């Protein structure tokens, strides 16, 4: 078996161990996750999903310019679709035409549906300074990076481990998906070179999190001192 096959199997093992730990969090399932992650790390590359080159140094000026034009076109296309709806909605509001307002609001909601779908936390990545998500814009993968320090600041938590940060984001996944998708739809992303391909990368800031209006919780970390027994009670670890 070659190294690529072994790395792929180790990555899949991390994902399986994570799902098992989420479904039934016990000392044994957490240990299994830690072992799977440690096994995967021996195959880790110096730079992988969680460790990007600073400032996209791997991209040429031409590639960066092409990415900028793609973002501009995406924003322009989206505005071209919604602008007529907004103009008609303004007129309907002025005329107090409730039926038309409702119809236009429904149409506007459909046009502004989340562009990104199928979000997941990337667990098999070596840098605990970030939580990495991937979502999909059709067949295009989009990566999102959330600095662990921003999570610590927002939730008033000190020194989150990579596993704890992943868990917090995973339990608030739908909310973070909406924050990332909104930023992506505004064209606020940059190209990121990885494994010979260039993917859109969204960087979440503390301001993005705190002004999103999303209700986020880190209460899942409060279970860290114990385990949930089959009857729902907390058993000290």
Image: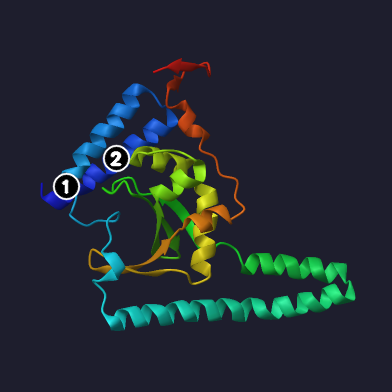
Q: Residue at x 24, y 32 (%)?
A: 35
Q: Is residue 86 visible?
A: yes
Q: Above or below — where is 46 with respect to 54?
A: above
Quarter of the image for residue 24 reads top left
List x then y, in percent, for residue 77: 55, 80
Q: Residue at x 49, y 57 (%)?
A: 117
Asked if residue 90 lies left or right of residue 107, the reply is right
Quarter of the image for residue 39 reads top left
Asked if residue 186 lies left or right of residue 6, the reply is right
Q: Mark 1: few, some, or many residues within 10 Å (few <14, many ≥20)?
A: some
Return the residue at label 2: 14
List x then y, in percent, for residue 103: 77, 68
- At numbered mark 2, what does the secondary structure look like: helix, strand or loop? helix
- At numbered mark 1, what does the secondary structure look like: helix, strand or loop? loop
Q: Residue at x 40, y 62 (%)?
A: 142
Q: CA distance from mark 2 to mark 1?
A: 12 Å
Q: Is residue 193 visible?
A: no
Asked if residue 81 lies left or right of residue 191, the reply is right
Outermost residue, right side: 96
Q: Earlier in the sequence, mark 2 or mark 1?
A: 2
Quarter of the image for residue 48 reads bottom left
Q: Nearer the viewer, residue 59 or 24?
A: 59
Q: Residue at x 28, y 43 (%)?
A: 12
Q: Above or below — where is 32 with respect to 174?
A: above
Q: Above or below — where is 153 with respect to 77?
A: above
Return the residue at label 1: 43
List x then y, in percent, for residue 153: 47, 46
């Amino acid at each position: 078996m070659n190294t690529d096959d072994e790395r792929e199997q180790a990555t899949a093992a991390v994902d399986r161990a994570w799902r098992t730990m989420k479904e039934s969090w016990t000392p044994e399932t957490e240990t299994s996750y830690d072992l799977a992650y440690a096994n995967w790390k021996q195959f880790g590359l110096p730079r992988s999903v969680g460790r990007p080159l600073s400032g996209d140094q791997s991209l040429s000026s031409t590639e960066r310019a092409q990415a900028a034009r793609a973002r501009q076109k995406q924003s322009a296309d989206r505005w071209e679709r919604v602008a007529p709806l907004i103009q008609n909605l303004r007129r309907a509001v002025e005329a107090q035409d409730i039926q038309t307002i409702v119809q236009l609001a429904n149409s506007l909601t459909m046009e502004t549906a989340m562009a990104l779908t199928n979000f997941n936390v990337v667990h098999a990545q070596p840098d605990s300074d970030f939580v990495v998500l991937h979502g999909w814009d059709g067949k295009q993968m989009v990566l999102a990076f959330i600095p662990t320090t921003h999570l610590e600041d927002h939730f008033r938590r000190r020194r989150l481990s990579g596993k704890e940060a992943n868990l917090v984001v995973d339990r608030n996944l739908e909310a973070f998906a909406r924050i990332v998708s909104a930023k992506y739809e505004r064209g606020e992303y940059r190209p990121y070179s990885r494994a010979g391909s260039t993917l859109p990368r969204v960087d979440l800031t503390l301001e993005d999190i705190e002004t999103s209006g999303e209700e986020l919780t880190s209460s899942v970390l409060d279970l860290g001192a114990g385990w949930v027994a089959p009857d729902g009670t907390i058993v000290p670890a």
